[in-house]
Image (cartoon, rainbow, N blue to C red):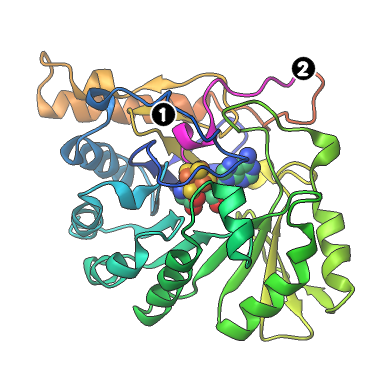
Amino acid sequence: MSLTDTYGRVHRDLRVSVTDRCNLRCTYCMPPDFADWMPGDHLLSIDELMTVIEVAVGEGIVSIRLTGGEPLVRPDIVEIVRRINALPVPPRVTLTTNALKLAELAQPLADAGLERVNISLDTLDPERFKRLTFRDRFDDVIAGVEAALAAGLHPVKVNTVLMRGVNDDEAVPMLRHSIENGWHLRFIEQMPLDAQGSWDRSEMVMAAEIHDLLETEFTLTPVPGRGSAPAEEFLVDDGPATVGIIASVSKPFCSACDRLRLTADGQLRNCLFARDETDIRATLRDPSLTDEQRRERIAGLLASSTLAKLPGHGINDPSFIQPDRPMSAIGG
Ligand code: SAM
Ligand code: SF4
């Protein structure tokens, strides 16, 4: 089976948000006093998550990315990874995290079959980190990155969102530090997905500008063969180190998108910026269905959501409307 949309895009990657809770408050994601959490009984249980993942794998999904919110605050996260890996044909499992809890969890996650991690870090300055996240936890992140490297979760990708006048002076130092420490750095353009709706196009640091900032110190050569990957990769000073730039806003890569998303409360989204969601939770919890009927119905919902996917996210259209839910609730 394959999840193919009307534009011929075959969907192989499912982003699974396991919680909307988080132990940081990154300014571009949620305000410090954010309290609009999903009701606890709306969050999918591990068994419910596994039912959706199993059906999705049967429909052609080969890669699962666990995310949130912060996926490591979910107490059963290691068990989730272990159970995905125990499937008859296990998909690749990766995870996106702020790394606060990674020092203790990197090895158990690796033992459970996690392939690698993406870690979010926007500054190398502990004081700035505190201002940007409203938590004094910089050292925990660094310990987490080191634990991921020690546990063999390679390549350890570090994602950085540059913001004008906030941390755009760190593009070069971030790359230098990453190369020296064996991190694979990727810069991500800031997107209109914050809970407070304060994104401002004129304020964002675009990919071309990031490229120019890096070229003041390094020579960047494009690496061919990007496929469906969101990041455009560049060799740094002829390699072997590389750096990625994810130009979601200024150079959208929708035509090669192969991703679907499941929110922590069981809603399927065919795009980060989709205005519609498909309710999987209701089917998971419908007591009138047998297990077989439930799985058949979920397979149908995956197919219909894929078929309804639009050609692009439309951020650059005048009619663009930011999704009702912030990134932390959708799953980044
Ligand atoms: N809490 C985990 C983390 O921060 O890695 C996983 C969830 S977080 C929503 C996933 C990614 O989304 C992070 O790399 C974060 O930097 C990014 N992100 C959040 N809000 C964003 C925004 N408005 N624009 C661009 N990236 C954003
Ligand atoms: Fe939490 Fe990740 Fe959002 Fe930061 S970006 S507030 S770590 S969910």
- In space, the residues marked 2 and 1 are separated at their CA atoms by 23 Å
Q: Is residue 185 above or below residue 210?
A: below
Q: Is residue 81 magenta?
A: no
Q: Amino acid at mark 2?
A: Ser
Q: Quadrant of residue 19?
A: top left
Q: Residue furthest top?
A: 288
Q: Which residues are magenta?
A: 319-332
Q: Could you say which disc has been placed on residue 247 in the image?
A: none
**Secondary structure state at the residue bearing disc 2:** loop
User: Could you tell me residue 1's position as x and y percent?
Assistant: 36, 42
Label 1 sits on residue? 268
In the drawing, what numbered circle is on residue 319? 2
Horizontal side of residue 219 vs 64, given as left or right: right
Q: Is most of the magenta stretch helix, strand or loop?
A: loop
Q: Is residue 11 visible?
A: no
Measured as percent of width and height from the top left, residue 260 is found at 47, 38
Vertical comparison of 93 with 151: above or below: above
Left or right: where does residue 237 sit relative to residue 178? right
**Which amino acid type is marked by label 1?**
Leu
Looking at the picture, tell me which residue is in the foreground, 266 or 54. 266
Number of numbered discs: 2
State left or right for residue 223 relative to residue 90.
right
Label 2, ligand 1: CB separation under 8 Å? no
